[in-house]
Image (cartoon, rainbow, N blue to C red):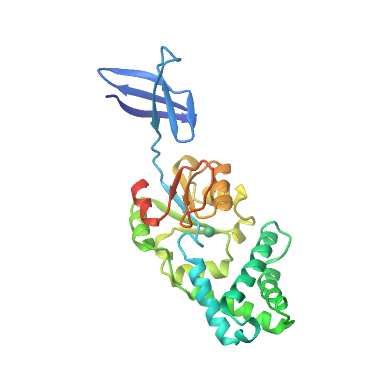
Amino acid sequence: MLNFRIENILNPYIYNIYIICNEFISIHIISKTNNFLTLYDSHFRCNKLKNIKIVKQYKNIYFDLDRTLWDFESNSKETFKDIFDKYNLIDIFGDFDIFLESYKKHNDRLWKLYRVGQIKKSLLRYKRFSLTLEEFGIKNDDLAQKIADDYITISPTKKQLFPGAHETLKYLNSKYNLYIITNGFNEVQFVKMENSNLDQYFDKVFTSENAGVQKPNKKIFEYALNSVNAKKCESIMIGDDLEVDIRGAKKYGLDQVFFNVVGCEHNEDITYEIDSLKKLQEIL
Ligand SMILES: [Mg+2]
């Protein structure tokens, strides 16, 4: 049985490895695929010795907020129920789920436009409701604006988190520097974190508004790491969105944890994948 020790990490692709057997033998590693190193004997490079998993020593953990820690769907639904009752929207839509389905369709489309800079925040906030009303024959700018304002005010007061959020963050906070990278709006995200008592665990919150760009743009990851002098090789990104969080972090060169609570099927090569927050305690 061989034991392995990794020393002198020169760059992400070249490691000096020592195999501890009867004596130390210096080995240079020339092959790295994802999280596995292939060991080759230093004297006989063609002799593949063993594949070993790289266990990195992280120092910095970057979390996404919405749908990763803060249960966006449940909190949104609660908010919309409040709004649905307040404005008697049953008279327009007949059913809460029909209203929600229509809103989600318009919201998703407008968010995509906002993400690529084609519309402004103020238009996104208002238009997603005016289009939902218009789809059901209601042209009422005043009502759309009131709903838009209420949504921004009420939604961040909701407090539902994913199971195990506090327990896991408490554990991680004792071992790592914790940060948030979020595409949400400043005035909403900070209120959410305070109301749900998440702010106590995080050293800093990086928002797309402050960074000037949104995930998956690598500049937001660069901004979040440079701001606290964090190294890529000592940092990892955790998020629920394959495109925005995972591919974004990967393109920048960060390791990733995909919080795949909805069981999304994919072929992406990801550092770690979990279906509950508590599983972070097994890998970090
Ligand atoms: Mg998210």
Q: Quadrant of the N terminus?
A: top left
Q: Is residue 75 left or right of residue 175?
A: right
Residue under the point 43% across and 25% down: 38
Q: How many marks?
A: 0
Furthest residue in direction left, as rendered:
22
- The residue closer to the viewer here, 268 or 223, is 268
Furthest residue in direction top, as rendered:
43
- The residue closer to the viewer here, 103 or 218, is 103
Residue 122 placed where, x, y %?
69, 71
Residue 274 placed where, x, y %?
42, 51
Residue 268 placed where, x, y %?
54, 43
User: Could you say which quadrant of the image residue 96 lies in?
Assistant: bottom right
Furthest residue in direction front, as rendered:
94
Residue under the point 38% across and 30% down: 52
Q: Is residue 243 left or right of residue 204?
A: right
Residue 21 placed where, x, y %?
27, 20
